[in-house]
Amino acid sequence: MNRVPMLAAGHAAVDLYQGAVPALVPFLVAERGYGYVAVSGVVLAATLLSSVVQPLFGLLTDRWRMPWLIPLSMVAAGAGVAVGGVAGSYALTCLAVALSGLGVAAYHPESARLARIASAGSHVRMSWFSLGGTLGFAAAPVLVTPLLAGWGLGASPMLAVPAVAGALATLPAVLALTGGDGSGGTRREGAGPVRRRDDWRSFTRLTLVIVFRSVVYVGLSTFVALYVGGGAAGAVALFVLFAGGAAGTVLGGRLAARWGRVRTLRLAYAAAVPAVAGVVLAQGPAAYVFVAASSVALYVPFSLHVTLGQDLLPNRVGTAGGVTLGLAVSVGGLTSPLVGAVAEASSLRVALGCLVVFPVLAWLLARTLEEPAGA
């Protein structure tokens, strides 16, 4: 039985909480009076710890089988966001969302390893697993905005429900893929021992591509709702941003099957440059078109980062998954306070305009990558 849909459902549940943090931003501004730098700090708290410990969890899962991390980390991610909305101070809010980020960090390396087993090396199947995370992002403003608009930040504990539901939905797939005892099967995912060497140089370049992609995407997800005016308009912008990623994720798997992963990466980042610029320059409804185009272009490479990284590090699949799948949506938060500072010093348009340089850098670096030999 194909376990990818179950794993994708779990991925949707955990990544909902990464999308929930940006969705909280307008309410933190409205109810608590936080400024751009302050709300950037909340996003930073959610992503800093996640970015730092993500590779550590990858190393751990390369050495030991830890499938129990998957349901546990999902619950932690939900609990952090649930508590963050009702925390009594700015410091406690940051600590709560940091717990959510820790849960996200713990989830991705082991889930990517199991998804690789379940997908049997198929780019298309792996894109469906990645699609689950993208749909979780897209669902966040749809769930968070109406709930908090109706009942305020005090209703945020209800946001823990999807985490529990996702953990229960994923558990049967985890048990099936690990032999039913939670310990896992063979240490390697292939039919025999891995004979190729790890290509750390190429993997480092790929990681930088992911970092550049993350900076622009997290920057957009943090501020695009405020940029278009907040409220219902902001919720629509976030939904378009996150939902566009769903189309991009599926498209990426299909394009890679036809053109190859590296060529697809290059084309996607080239397309992202005018798309992101259009978000800044367009007026009125046209801005939503460019938000969607940016999301599609930035998400076409999303699942390809994962499989490419795992093929570049065939002996460190957990590490590769932790960096490519987790870092892709977390490290950009480290630069959010800088974007917020630029916005307060000049304007939000200028701050978002600075993001255009990052898809350019990603495209230039992607041109140096090649398909792994023997992959």
Image (cartoon, rainbow, N blue to C red):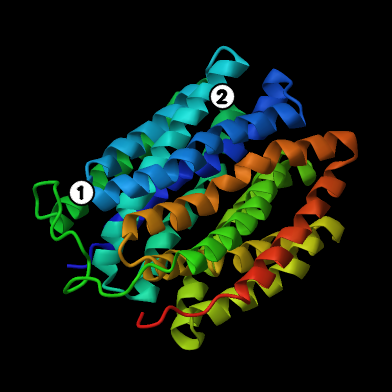
Front of the two marks 2 and 1: 1
Q: Residue at x 42, y 47 (%)?
A: 55
Residue 356 shown left or right of residue 219 in the figure = right
Please say whether residue 76 is visible from this viewpoint: yes
Tell me if 325 is positioned left or right of 192 in this view: right
Front position in the image: 163 or 365: 365
Q: Position of residue 76 (x, y in %)?
A: 37, 32
Identify the image quadrant of residue 263: bottom right
Q: Is residue 170 above or below residue 29?
A: below
Amino acid bearing label 1 = Arg
Q: Is residue 69 above or below residue 158?
A: below
- The residue tagged 2 is 94
> What's under tag 2, amino acid-wise?
Cys
Q: Residue at x 19, y 71 (%)?
A: 193
Q: Earlier in the sequence, mark 2 or mark 1?
A: 1
In space, the residues marked 2 and 1 are separated at their CA atoms by 31 Å
Per the image, label 2 sits on a secondary structure element best described as helix
Q: Secondary structure at mark 1?
A: loop
Q: Which residue occupies the foreground of this view, 157 or 204? A: 204
Q: Residue at x 46, y 50 (%)?
A: 326
Q: Is residue 236 visible?
A: no
Place of residue 199 in the rendered image (x, y in percent of width and height, measured from the top left): 43, 69
Q: Quadrant of the C terminus?
A: bottom left
Which residue, given by chain and number where applicable, does mark 1 sit on?
Answer: 65
- Counting from the top left corner in percent of width and height, residue 299 is at 56, 64
